[in-house]
Amino acid sequence: MKLVQNLILLTVCLFLFTMCENSITGPDGPKGELPRDLTTGEKLLVEADGSFSYDIFRRTVNRETEKENLMISPLSISMALAMTLNGAQGSTYDKMQQALYLSGMEIEEINEAFRSLTELLVSVDPQVTIRIANSIWYKNGLPVEEEFLDSMRDFFDARVEGIDFDDPASVDIINNWVNENTEGLIEEIVKQIEPQMVMFLINALYFKGDWLRPFDVEDTRKADFSLESGETTEVDMMHQEGRFALYFSDEVRMAEIPYGDSLFTMSVLMPADPDMPIGQFVEENVTSASLDNWRSNLTVDSREITLELPKFEFEYEIKYNDILKAMGMDTAFNKSEANFKGIADVSPRNLYIDEVKHKTFIRVDEKGTEAAAVTSVGFGIESLPPQMIVDRPFAFIIHERESGTNLFMGVVRNP
Protein backbone atom coordinates (compact mmCIF):
# COMPACT_ATOMS: atom_id res chain seq x y z
CA MET A 1 0.00 0.00 0.00
CA LYS A 2 1.27 3.40 -0.91
CA LEU A 3 2.53 5.45 2.03
CA VAL A 4 0.89 8.77 2.62
CA GLN A 5 3.64 11.15 3.65
CA ASN A 6 3.40 14.51 5.37
CA LEU A 7 -0.33 14.80 4.80
CA ILE A 8 -1.80 18.21 5.38
CA LEU A 9 -5.46 19.03 5.45
CA LEU A 10 -5.45 22.63 4.45
CA THR A 11 -7.89 23.97 6.96
CA VAL A 12 -8.04 27.32 5.23
CA CYS A 13 -9.82 25.50 2.44
CA LEU A 14 -11.97 23.50 4.80
CA PHE A 15 -13.37 26.47 6.67
CA LEU A 16 -13.59 28.79 3.71
CA PHE A 17 -14.73 25.64 1.98
CA THR A 18 -13.39 26.30 -1.51
CA MET A 19 -16.71 27.70 -2.61
CA CYS A 20 -15.77 28.40 -6.20
CA GLU A 21 -17.98 28.74 -9.24
CA ASN A 22 -15.45 26.91 -11.40
CA SER A 23 -14.69 24.11 -8.95
CA ILE A 24 -13.72 20.90 -10.72
CA THR A 25 -15.56 17.88 -9.41
CA GLY A 26 -15.24 15.39 -12.23
CA PRO A 27 -17.51 14.12 -14.98
CA ASP A 28 -19.22 11.56 -12.75
CA GLY A 29 -20.43 14.16 -10.27
CA PRO A 30 -22.34 17.42 -10.57
CA LYS A 31 -20.36 20.60 -11.02
CA GLY A 32 -21.16 22.92 -8.13
CA GLU A 33 -22.64 26.26 -9.10
CA LEU A 34 -23.66 29.15 -6.91
CA PRO A 35 -27.34 30.10 -7.09
CA ARG A 36 -26.33 33.71 -7.77
CA ASP A 37 -23.30 35.81 -8.56
CA LEU A 38 -21.36 37.22 -5.65
CA THR A 39 -21.97 40.90 -4.99
CA THR A 40 -19.13 43.39 -5.34
CA GLY A 41 -18.90 43.60 -1.56
CA GLU A 42 -18.84 39.83 -1.19
CA LYS A 43 -16.06 39.54 -3.75
CA LEU A 44 -14.00 42.15 -1.90
CA LEU A 45 -14.64 40.39 1.41
CA VAL A 46 -13.73 36.95 0.04
CA GLU A 47 -10.51 38.39 -1.41
CA ALA A 48 -9.63 40.07 1.89
CA ASP A 49 -10.51 36.98 3.89
CA GLY A 50 -8.37 34.89 1.56
CA SER A 51 -5.32 37.06 2.25
CA PHE A 52 -6.05 37.07 5.98
CA SER A 53 -6.58 33.30 5.96
CA TYR A 54 -3.25 32.36 4.47
CA ASP A 55 -1.41 34.95 6.54
CA ILE A 56 -2.76 33.79 9.89
CA PHE A 57 -2.53 30.12 8.87
CA ARG A 58 1.18 30.37 8.03
CA ARG A 59 1.87 32.27 11.25
CA THR A 60 -0.02 29.66 13.25
CA VAL A 61 1.84 26.74 11.67
CA ASN A 62 5.19 28.50 12.19
CA ARG A 63 4.46 29.11 15.85
CA GLU A 64 2.88 25.80 16.74
CA THR A 65 5.84 23.62 15.75
CA GLU A 66 5.35 21.33 18.74
CA LYS A 67 1.74 20.54 17.83
CA GLU A 68 1.30 17.44 15.68
CA ASN A 69 -2.12 18.45 14.41
CA LEU A 70 -3.77 21.82 14.17
CA MET A 71 -6.79 23.33 12.50
CA ILE A 72 -8.07 26.87 12.41
CA SER A 73 -11.17 28.55 11.02
CA PRO A 74 -10.14 31.82 9.38
CA LEU A 75 -13.80 32.57 8.71
CA SER A 76 -14.66 32.33 12.41
CA ILE A 77 -11.68 34.46 13.43
CA SER A 78 -12.24 37.15 10.82
CA MET A 79 -15.98 37.38 11.54
CA ALA A 80 -15.41 37.79 15.28
CA LEU A 81 -12.79 40.46 14.65
CA ALA A 82 -14.97 42.21 12.05
CA MET A 83 -17.71 42.45 14.67
CA THR A 84 -15.15 43.93 17.05
CA LEU A 85 -14.06 46.37 14.34
CA ASN A 86 -17.50 47.98 14.55
CA GLY A 87 -16.63 49.37 17.97
CA ALA A 88 -13.05 50.42 17.26
CA GLN A 89 -12.07 54.03 16.62
CA GLY A 90 -9.00 56.00 15.56
CA SER A 91 -5.73 54.12 15.12
CA THR A 92 -7.25 51.04 16.77
CA TYR A 93 -9.73 50.83 13.90
CA ASP A 94 -7.11 51.55 11.23
CA LYS A 95 -4.71 48.87 12.45
CA MET A 96 -7.41 46.24 12.85
CA GLN A 97 -8.77 47.02 9.40
CA GLN A 98 -5.31 46.64 7.87
CA ALA A 99 -4.58 43.39 9.71
CA LEU A 100 -7.86 41.98 8.39
CA TYR A 101 -6.94 43.11 4.84
CA LEU A 102 -10.15 45.18 4.76
CA SER A 103 -8.63 48.61 4.11
CA GLY A 104 -10.50 48.98 0.82
CA MET A 105 -13.93 48.64 2.43
CA GLU A 106 -16.07 50.88 4.61
CA ILE A 107 -17.53 49.35 7.76
CA GLU A 108 -21.03 49.41 6.26
CA GLU A 109 -19.78 47.42 3.25
CA ILE A 110 -18.00 44.94 5.51
CA ASN A 111 -21.09 44.37 7.62
CA GLU A 112 -23.41 43.95 4.65
CA ALA A 113 -20.98 41.60 2.90
CA PHE A 114 -20.70 39.39 5.99
CA ARG A 115 -24.48 39.29 6.33
CA SER A 116 -25.16 38.33 2.72
CA LEU A 117 -22.23 35.89 2.51
CA THR A 118 -23.40 34.17 5.70
CA GLU A 119 -26.90 33.79 4.25
CA LEU A 120 -25.38 32.28 1.11
CA LEU A 121 -23.04 29.87 2.92
CA VAL A 122 -25.68 28.38 5.19
CA SER A 123 -28.15 27.72 2.37
CA VAL A 124 -26.10 27.07 -0.75
CA ASP A 125 -25.98 23.26 -0.44
CA PRO A 126 -28.93 21.47 1.20
CA GLN A 127 -26.78 18.34 1.56
CA VAL A 128 -24.25 20.16 3.73
CA THR A 129 -25.08 21.58 7.15
CA ILE A 130 -23.47 24.89 8.04
CA ARG A 131 -24.44 27.01 11.00
CA ILE A 132 -22.89 30.35 11.86
CA ALA A 133 -23.89 31.96 15.15
CA ASN A 134 -22.74 35.06 16.99
CA SER A 135 -23.29 36.34 20.51
CA ILE A 136 -22.28 39.18 22.80
CA TRP A 137 -22.24 38.74 26.56
CA TYR A 138 -21.53 41.84 28.61
CA LYS A 139 -21.29 42.60 32.30
CA ASN A 140 -24.40 44.13 33.79
CA GLY A 141 -23.87 47.86 34.16
CA LEU A 142 -21.43 48.24 31.25
CA PRO A 143 -22.67 51.27 29.26
CA VAL A 144 -22.70 49.52 25.88
CA GLU A 145 -23.46 51.78 22.92
CA GLU A 146 -26.88 50.97 21.49
CA GLU A 147 -25.66 51.70 17.95
CA PHE A 148 -23.02 48.99 18.32
CA LEU A 149 -25.53 46.46 19.61
CA ASP A 150 -27.96 47.32 16.81
CA SER A 151 -25.25 46.62 14.21
CA MET A 152 -24.45 43.31 15.86
CA ARG A 153 -28.10 42.27 15.76
CA ASP A 154 -28.85 43.58 12.27
CA PHE A 155 -25.77 42.40 10.38
CA PHE A 156 -24.50 39.45 12.42
CA ASP A 157 -27.78 38.19 13.90
CA ALA A 158 -26.04 38.23 17.27
CA ARG A 159 -27.62 37.25 20.53
CA VAL A 160 -26.98 40.13 22.92
CA GLU A 161 -27.31 39.66 26.65
CA GLY A 162 -26.17 41.43 29.80
CA ILE A 163 -25.42 39.02 32.65
CA ASP A 164 -23.94 39.06 36.14
CA PHE A 165 -20.24 38.41 35.58
CA ASP A 166 -19.77 38.03 39.34
CA ASP A 167 -22.08 35.01 39.36
CA PRO A 168 -20.17 31.77 38.57
CA ALA A 169 -23.27 30.57 36.69
CA SER A 170 -22.49 33.13 33.96
CA VAL A 171 -19.69 30.86 32.73
CA ASP A 172 -22.19 28.06 32.24
CA ILE A 173 -24.60 30.36 30.39
CA ILE A 174 -21.93 31.31 27.86
CA ASN A 175 -20.55 27.79 27.46
CA ASN A 176 -24.03 26.30 27.06
CA TRP A 177 -24.53 28.63 24.09
CA VAL A 178 -21.20 27.48 22.62
CA ASN A 179 -22.04 23.82 23.17
CA GLU A 180 -25.46 24.21 21.56
CA ASN A 181 -24.18 26.04 18.50
CA THR A 182 -21.40 23.53 17.82
CA GLU A 183 -23.59 20.44 18.30
CA GLY A 184 -21.57 19.50 21.37
CA LEU A 185 -18.24 19.38 19.53
CA ILE A 186 -16.90 22.31 21.57
CA GLU A 187 -18.25 22.42 25.09
CA GLU A 188 -16.31 25.31 26.60
CA ILE A 189 -14.67 28.56 25.56
CA VAL A 190 -14.69 30.45 28.90
CA LYS A 191 -13.09 28.71 31.89
CA GLN A 192 -13.69 31.52 34.35
CA ILE A 193 -14.44 35.23 34.22
CA GLU A 194 -11.48 37.22 35.49
CA PRO A 195 -12.20 40.43 37.46
CA GLN A 196 -11.14 42.74 34.61
CA MET A 197 -13.40 41.10 32.01
CA VAL A 198 -16.54 42.97 30.95
CA MET A 199 -17.52 41.47 27.58
CA PHE A 200 -17.17 38.35 25.42
CA LEU A 201 -17.88 38.59 21.71
CA ILE A 202 -18.18 35.06 20.34
CA ASN A 203 -18.53 33.43 16.92
CA ALA A 204 -19.44 29.76 16.53
CA LEU A 205 -19.19 27.83 13.26
CA TYR A 206 -20.47 24.30 12.64
CA PHE A 207 -19.99 22.17 9.51
CA LYS A 208 -21.22 18.72 8.63
CA GLY A 209 -20.80 17.38 5.12
CA ASP A 210 -21.03 13.93 3.60
CA TRP A 211 -18.60 13.08 0.81
CA LEU A 212 -20.05 13.21 -2.68
CA ARG A 213 -18.57 9.71 -3.00
CA PRO A 214 -18.33 8.12 0.47
CA PHE A 215 -15.59 5.66 1.31
CA ASP A 216 -16.66 2.08 1.91
CA VAL A 217 -16.08 1.14 5.56
CA GLU A 218 -15.10 -2.37 4.49
CA ASP A 219 -12.24 -0.96 2.41
CA THR A 220 -10.67 0.80 5.41
CA ARG A 221 -7.56 -1.04 6.58
CA LYS A 222 -4.55 -0.57 8.81
CA ALA A 223 -1.66 1.16 7.06
CA ASP A 224 1.58 2.95 7.85
CA PHE A 225 1.67 6.75 7.97
CA SER A 226 5.13 8.31 7.69
CA LEU A 227 6.01 10.84 10.37
CA GLU A 228 8.45 13.72 9.95
CA SER A 229 10.75 12.04 12.47
CA GLY A 230 11.30 9.21 10.00
CA GLU A 231 9.23 6.80 12.05
CA THR A 232 5.87 5.38 11.01
CA THR A 233 2.61 5.03 12.86
CA GLU A 234 -0.33 2.78 12.10
CA VAL A 235 -3.56 4.49 11.04
CA ASP A 236 -6.99 3.54 9.75
CA MET A 237 -6.57 4.27 6.05
CA MET A 238 -9.71 4.83 3.98
CA HIS A 239 -9.55 3.66 0.39
CA GLN A 240 -11.51 4.08 -2.82
CA GLU A 241 -11.11 3.99 -6.57
CA GLY A 242 -12.68 6.90 -8.43
CA ARG A 243 -12.22 9.95 -10.59
CA PHE A 244 -10.96 12.87 -8.54
CA ALA A 245 -9.49 16.23 -9.43
CA LEU A 246 -5.70 16.08 -9.03
CA TYR A 247 -2.72 18.35 -9.55
CA PHE A 248 0.90 17.17 -9.33
CA SER A 249 3.82 19.56 -9.76
CA ASP A 250 7.39 20.04 -8.56
CA GLU A 251 5.93 21.74 -5.47
CA VAL A 252 2.76 19.94 -4.50
CA ARG A 253 0.61 16.85 -4.68
CA MET A 254 -3.01 18.01 -4.49
CA ALA A 255 -6.39 16.30 -4.50
CA GLU A 256 -9.81 17.85 -4.14
CA ILE A 257 -12.52 15.80 -2.43
CA PRO A 258 -16.06 17.18 -2.81
CA TYR A 259 -18.93 17.18 -0.34
CA GLY A 260 -22.66 17.19 -1.04
CA ASP A 261 -23.44 18.95 -4.31
CA SER A 262 -19.74 19.76 -4.83
CA LEU A 263 -19.77 23.41 -3.79
CA PHE A 264 -17.76 22.53 -0.69
CA THR A 265 -14.54 20.58 -1.00
CA MET A 266 -11.60 19.49 1.08
CA SER A 267 -8.31 20.30 -0.59
CA VAL A 268 -5.63 17.83 0.50
CA LEU A 269 -2.02 18.85 -0.12
CA MET A 270 1.35 17.21 0.38
CA PRO A 271 4.81 18.53 -0.49
CA ALA A 272 6.09 17.02 -3.71
CA ASP A 273 9.34 16.40 -1.83
CA PRO A 274 8.52 13.69 0.74
CA ASP A 275 11.39 14.90 2.94
CA MET A 276 10.12 18.48 3.22
CA PRO A 277 8.62 19.29 6.65
CA ILE A 278 5.01 20.35 6.39
CA GLY A 279 5.71 23.63 8.19
CA GLN A 280 8.33 24.56 5.61
CA PHE A 281 5.92 23.63 2.83
CA VAL A 282 3.22 25.89 4.26
CA GLU A 283 5.64 28.78 4.78
CA GLU A 284 7.15 28.62 1.30
CA ASN A 285 4.23 27.54 -0.84
CA VAL A 286 0.80 28.03 0.69
CA THR A 287 -0.44 31.43 -0.44
CA SER A 288 -3.64 32.72 -1.96
CA ALA A 289 -1.93 33.02 -5.34
CA SER A 290 -0.44 29.52 -5.24
CA LEU A 291 -3.76 27.93 -4.27
CA ASP A 292 -5.53 29.78 -7.10
CA ASN A 293 -2.86 28.52 -9.50
CA TRP A 294 -3.02 24.93 -8.25
CA ARG A 295 -6.80 24.85 -8.36
CA SER A 296 -6.87 26.23 -11.88
CA ASN A 297 -4.64 23.31 -12.92
CA LEU A 298 -6.73 20.58 -11.29
CA THR A 299 -7.72 17.94 -13.83
CA VAL A 300 -9.74 14.75 -13.74
CA ASP A 301 -8.02 11.76 -15.32
CA SER A 302 -10.08 9.61 -17.64
CA ARG A 303 -9.01 6.62 -15.57
CA GLU A 304 -10.03 5.83 -12.03
CA ILE A 305 -7.33 6.68 -9.51
CA THR A 306 -6.61 5.34 -6.05
CA LEU A 307 -7.36 7.72 -3.21
CA GLU A 308 -6.25 6.83 0.31
CA LEU A 309 -6.93 9.13 3.24
CA PRO A 310 -6.49 8.40 6.96
CA LYS A 311 -9.40 8.70 9.33
CA PHE A 312 -8.67 11.23 12.02
CA GLU A 313 -10.18 13.25 14.83
CA PHE A 314 -8.66 15.96 17.01
CA GLU A 315 -9.31 19.24 18.78
CA TYR A 316 -7.11 22.30 18.89
CA GLU A 317 -6.92 25.50 20.91
CA ILE A 318 -4.82 28.64 20.59
CA LYS A 319 -4.64 32.09 22.15
CA TYR A 320 -4.15 34.54 19.28
CA ASN A 321 -2.96 37.65 21.13
CA ASP A 322 0.69 37.49 20.05
CA ILE A 323 0.02 36.54 16.44
CA LEU A 324 -2.59 39.28 15.99
CA LYS A 325 -0.23 41.82 17.54
CA ALA A 326 2.46 40.74 15.07
CA MET A 327 -0.04 41.20 12.24
CA GLY A 328 -0.39 44.85 13.25
CA MET A 329 -3.29 44.74 15.70
CA ASP A 330 -1.16 45.66 18.72
CA THR A 331 -3.03 48.83 19.72
CA ALA A 332 -6.26 46.90 20.27
CA PHE A 333 -4.54 44.93 23.06
CA ASN A 334 -2.90 47.96 24.69
CA LYS A 335 -4.63 48.74 27.98
CA SER A 336 -4.02 52.48 27.76
CA GLU A 337 -4.04 53.09 23.99
CA ALA A 338 -6.89 50.90 22.71
CA ASN A 339 -9.94 52.86 21.58
CA PHE A 340 -13.20 50.93 21.68
CA LYS A 341 -15.42 53.85 22.62
CA GLY A 342 -17.75 52.67 19.85
CA ILE A 343 -18.53 49.71 22.12
CA ALA A 344 -18.59 51.49 25.47
CA ASP A 345 -17.16 54.70 26.89
CA VAL A 346 -15.84 53.81 30.32
CA SER A 347 -13.76 56.97 30.89
CA PRO A 348 -11.51 57.55 32.75
CA ARG A 349 -10.83 53.84 32.40
CA ASN A 350 -10.24 52.13 29.07
CA LEU A 351 -11.72 49.17 27.19
CA TYR A 352 -9.25 46.85 25.44
CA ILE A 353 -9.01 43.33 24.01
CA ASP A 354 -7.74 41.11 26.79
CA GLU A 355 -7.77 37.81 24.91
CA VAL A 356 -8.65 36.26 21.55
CA LYS A 357 -9.19 32.55 22.04
CA HIS A 358 -9.83 30.06 19.23
CA LYS A 359 -10.93 26.43 19.56
CA THR A 360 -11.66 23.87 16.84
CA PHE A 361 -12.68 20.24 16.45
CA ILE A 362 -12.69 17.98 13.39
CA ARG A 363 -13.68 14.39 12.65
CA VAL A 364 -13.04 12.81 9.23
CA ASP A 365 -14.31 9.32 8.42
CA GLU A 366 -15.74 7.23 5.60
CA LYS A 367 -19.01 9.16 5.55
CA GLY A 368 -17.65 12.69 5.55
CA THR A 369 -16.52 15.48 7.85
CA GLU A 370 -17.91 17.10 10.98
CA ALA A 371 -16.12 20.16 12.29
CA ALA A 372 -16.65 23.19 14.49
CA ALA A 373 -14.85 26.35 15.53
CA VAL A 374 -15.37 28.99 18.20
CA THR A 375 -13.63 32.35 18.43
CA SER A 376 -13.97 34.45 21.58
CA VAL A 377 -12.86 38.08 21.79
CA GLY A 378 -12.72 38.95 25.48
CA PHE A 379 -12.70 42.61 26.54
CA GLY A 380 -11.21 43.92 29.75
CA ILE A 381 -11.28 47.30 31.47
CA GLU A 382 -8.03 48.98 32.39
CA SER A 383 -7.56 49.27 36.12
CA LEU A 384 -7.85 52.78 37.46
CA PRO A 385 -4.52 54.44 38.31
CA PRO A 386 -3.69 54.29 42.02
CA GLN A 387 -5.47 57.08 43.86
CA MET A 388 -4.49 58.92 47.06
CA ILE A 389 -7.62 60.58 48.40
CA VAL A 390 -6.93 62.03 51.83
CA ASP A 391 -10.49 62.01 53.20
CA ARG A 392 -9.93 60.67 56.72
CA PRO A 393 -7.50 61.33 59.60
CA PHE A 394 -3.86 61.29 58.54
CA ALA A 395 -0.31 61.81 59.72
CA PHE A 396 2.27 63.94 57.98
CA ILE A 397 6.00 64.54 58.09
CA ILE A 398 7.95 67.40 56.59
CA HIS A 399 11.56 66.39 56.13
CA GLU A 400 14.71 66.95 54.15
CA ARG A 401 15.12 63.89 51.95
CA GLU A 402 18.89 63.68 51.54
CA SER A 403 19.84 63.99 55.18
CA GLY A 404 16.64 62.50 56.52
CA THR A 405 16.14 65.41 58.89
CA ASN A 406 12.54 65.64 60.07
CA LEU A 407 11.42 69.23 60.43
CA PHE A 408 7.79 68.75 61.36
CA MET A 409 5.61 65.77 62.23
CA GLY A 410 1.90 65.88 62.89
CA VAL A 411 -1.55 64.29 62.89
CA VAL A 412 -4.77 65.75 61.45
CA ARG A 413 -8.04 64.38 62.78
CA ASN A 414 -10.29 67.26 61.73
CA PRO A 415 -8.84 69.62 59.10
Image: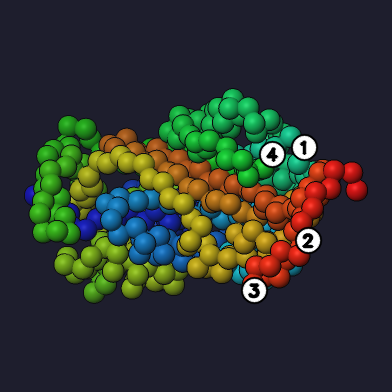
- How many angstroms separate mark 2 from mark 3 (CA)? 16 Å
- How many angstroms separate mark 4 from mark 3 (CA)? 51 Å
Badge 1 is on which residue?
141
Under tag 1, what secondary structure? Answer: loop
Badge 3 is on which residue?
402
Verify CB contact (< 8 Å) between mark 1 and mark 3. no
Verify CB contact (< 8 Å) between mark 1 and mark 2. no
- How many angstroms separate mark 4 from mark 1 (CA)? 9 Å
Q: Viewer-nearest of labels 4 and 3?
A: 3
Q: Viewer-nearest of labels 1 and 2?
A: 2
Badge 2 is on which residue?
408
Verify CB contact (< 8 Å) between mark 4 and mark 3. no
Q: Position of residue 80 (x, y in %)?
A: 60, 50
Q: Where is residue 405 in the image (x, y as percent from the top left)?
A: 68, 67
Under tag 3, what secondary structure? Answer: loop
Say what amino acid the circle numbered 4 marks.
Tyr
* Residue 154 showing in the rendered view: no
